[in-house]
Image (cartoon, rainbow, N blue to C red):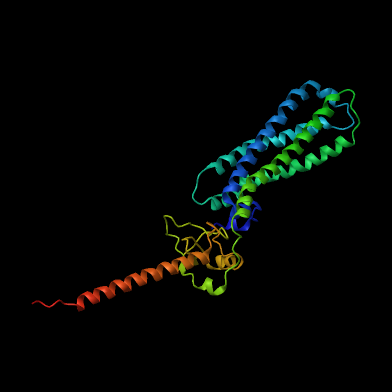
Amino acid sequence: MPAQLQNHAEDPLLSVVQSRPLEALKFLKRATLLGSAFGILISIPACIFLPMYWTHCGRCNRPLHYWVVVFCALQMMQVPMRLMIYVQVQRQCEDFQQHFRQLTHSAMWQYSKRISIASYGWFVLGAVWLLNSTFCEPCPGIYRLCLGIILASVGRLIATLLLFYRSFQSVEEEDSQMSPVPKGAEQALIDLIPLERGCSCSSGADAESCAVCLNDFEDGDVMRRLPCGHAFHCACVDNWLKRNKACPLCRQDVEELMKEQQVQACAQSESTLSSRQRARTSKAYVPHRT
């Protein structure tokens, strides 16, 4: 993995993507589209109102017209970046977690985060100005415009929280209806899972990175391949299985899978043994000719 990716602090969204990749993908696409639409919609009335009443708004006791210009500019600057992030997320890739990790370390993502932080700070400043300003008689519309932008911003925040809740609600309901999440596995069970050596040249169905730590597999890495077929770094999956004996990717119970494999192996062994016994019996029995 490149050194610059390791030096960056991991984005908090990575933990969500790691645990619920499909639901996180759905939420991220909806949130980026909502933010883009919000930036465009609040800028339209501001672009119509301010050129008409700019001089009158300058007579108010607070420079609310400048606040509107800067706030709308910050929102419009994020629109193309949000749409580019939407396009990047929309791409179908086998290893979405690795793809998302690279996206969060990109300059576009970092730049968008900085603008968002500046936008939140500017929003707080505008709310304080609006609360401490008197009604502007030369330009009464600027007060209503700022109030509308602030209310729309609060509405967008609530809508984003609802999107997050709805994106993960169905999964939580399904989990609650299903059997309880498996508890951690014992060390003796973990030791029965075979070890492998990582190889960067491997391709095909094997993943190129560990889904627990999201780091790429390198030559010589010690890996464990679970009964379901998914492979992880040995240290990563051992710590995972001690807390939860379900596969981090497919959520199948590792202990149950190993029991099934043992039953199948015993059945196959018994079948092979019985076949050999029948073969020996048939060879030992030679009918006498009369």
Q: Number of numbered discs present?
A: 0
Left or right position of 17 against 50: left
The answer to whether 2 is drawn above or below residue 67 in the figure is: below
In this view, the residue in front, 55 or 232, is 232
Residue positioned 57% across, 58% down in the render: 3
Residue positioned 67% across, 36% down in the render: 77
In this view, the residue in front, 42 or 169, is 169
Quarter of the image containing the C terminus?
Answer: bottom left
Residue 97: give x, y in percent of width and height. Answer: 55, 52
- Residue 187 visible in the current orientation: yes
Residue extending farthest to the front is 290
Residue 63: give x, y in percent of width and height. Answer: 84, 32
Left or right position of 70 against 282: right
Residue 66: give x, y in percent of width and height. Answer: 80, 32
- Residue 220 visible in the current orientation: no
Residue positioned 20% across, 79% down in the render: 284
Quarter of the image containing the N terminus?
Answer: bottom right
Residue extending farthest to the left is 290
Left or right position of 85 against 66: left
Residue 224: give x, y in percent of width and height. Answer: 49, 66
Picture quarter containing residue 265?
Answer: bottom left
Residue extending farthest to the right is 134
The answer to whether 216 is drawn above or below residue 136 in the figure is: below
The answer to whether 129 is drawn above or below residue 103 in the figure is: above
